[in-house]
Image (cartoon, grey):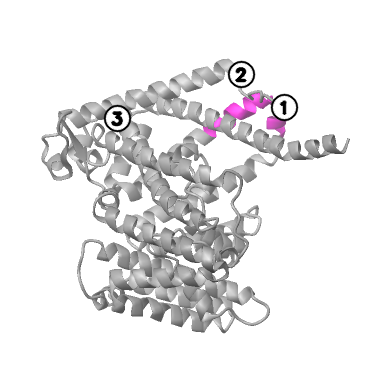
Amino acid sequence: MGIKSGLPRYELYLYTAVLSGALVWAASWIFQASSENVSRQTFRESVKPGWYYFGRKMDVADFEWVMWFSTFRNHILFAFAGHVIFAKIFTLLAPKHRSLIFCVYGGLAVLITMGWTFMALILSHCIILYSVALIKIKWMCFAAGLANLASIKLEPYNSWQEKLVTGSFDLQDILFYGGCGFTIMRCMSFALENCEKKDGNYTFCDLMKYNFYLPFFFFGPIMTFDKYHAQVNNATLTRKEREMWKITTKAILHLSVILSVDAFFHYLYILTIPSDMKLVTKLSDWCLAGLAYFNLVYDWLKAAVMFGVINTVATLDHLDPPQPPKCITMLYVFAETHFDRGINDWLCKYVYDYIGGNHDQIFKELLATISTFAITTLWLGPCELVYIWSFFNCFGLNFELWVAKLFSIPPFSTMEGFMGDAMSRRIRGLFNAANFWAIVLYNILSLNSLEFAKMVGRRLIFKGFPLSTISVLLVTYCGVQLIKEYERQQAMLEDVQQIKPIDDGKEKAE
């Protein structure tokens, strides 16, 4: 069954050609800036020898990417390989006790990696929040959890706890804050789910099994306790149709992405260029727009690879973990903007949806978003840049609701009713294109710097007006229309797949 496009065929070809041409054009400017300025002092610090035979150096400005595929590579491969083998053997021997096996292996791995003082610190957080969970009062669970989270995010308490962990190696800081932070969020989920349990309480052993599942321990994502508890205690272990093929395909895809990003960093120094503001001021408007866009795409790729690898291991353990983040290119509304779907699911369940309800009331939505971003600010670590990022993203989320409310009342709703579908789609596409660049500008704050974000905004909105502003919005408009068409076709495919089994059943009955 073919699916007819909502867009005329000529529009699809036109939008694809414009978008592809603009990306190549912007990339050519970045390539030129990367090649001509490699001898600058800023580049010497973060552009290191790469492909010798091709005469290309590599951008290594992102310590996190370098850490994942150099220092941490051997550690994670060894730990995950051991987990998969260990878990598979004991899952076959004792499927009813696999959650305990995961816990024992994870606990031993954490103890060997970080030492007994770190383990004692983690257990102290767990004991405190478990004790509060027994009271079964939600606000007390939240207060205790946020106090514990503040203790590793605010001075002098975080430095005091960090000094308790003896020893020193390259990954200690990252593993320390990752392990502590995700432990506290998991303990809060356990406590809040225990409040919902009508008969009795979950045991401390249940919390330990939940917290010390190694693939999620240091880097997430977070599965809420109710989902993890139900899935890991399911003794009926079956694979979905073609599940192993899908797992293999995803593993190959992740490897391909890693190699592609590695090649990309040899030609486009998108991370180093924004750190040299003297150079940035000399770049064209298209080069700046491309830098902002490619930085967000790269950050999404990094999150997708990291969570994709972890989720592959979790899927092998018969779990259904939170999915990797939605591609930044597909985001034109603030409501779907998140890079960690596990944290997003946690916040939505316990804060955003709990307070905001169905999200159609302005004041409840405002309270829900402020509460959500207040906790997010604490999770990220309070500082000026995080405050600015939280404020603008909170404003963007609410502004979407205000605009939707405004255009749902007469005379705007009446005017749209008289328009054809094509005209309505185009007008909405223009608003979505502007919204996309608001998302880009607000989020490069956390990826690059406040100065770079201000420079991009000033050049594209003020100095570049009207030529650069209209050109960039036109290209973004083409991208938004293609994305909407893709989403429409995916929705139709899902509808067809839901209807087809019913039709097959009728045919068999006949």
Q: What residue type is labelled 2?
A: Pro
Give the secondary structure at mark 3.
Answer: helix
Q: Considering only order in the chain, which callout, 3 or 1, is on the residue closer to the N terminus?
A: 3
Left or right, 178 with respect to 331, comes to left
Residue under numbered circle 3 = 287
The relative height of residue 394 versus residue 192 in the rendered view (above or below) is above
Give the secondary structure at mark 1.
Answer: helix
The relative height of residue 378 versus residue 430 in the rendered view (above or below) is below
- Residue positioned most to the right: 510
The range drawn in magenta is 414-431
- Residue 290, image quadrant: top left
Label 1, label 3: how many angstroms apart (C-alpha)? 41 Å
Label 2, residues with CA under 10 Å away: few <14, some 14-19, many ≥20: few
For the residues carrying marks 2 and 1, which lies nearer the camera in this image? 2
**Residue 374 visible in this rendered orientation of the protein:** no
Q: Residue 454 at what x, y percent from top left?
A: 31, 42
Q: Considering only order in the chain, which callout, 3 or 2, is on the residue closer to the N terminus?
A: 2
- In the picture, the disc for residue 476 is none
- Residue positioned most to the top: 10
Residue under numbered circle 1 = 418
The relative height of residue 77 versus residue 298 in the rendered view (above or below) is below
Residue drawn at point x = 34 percent, y = 28 percent: 464
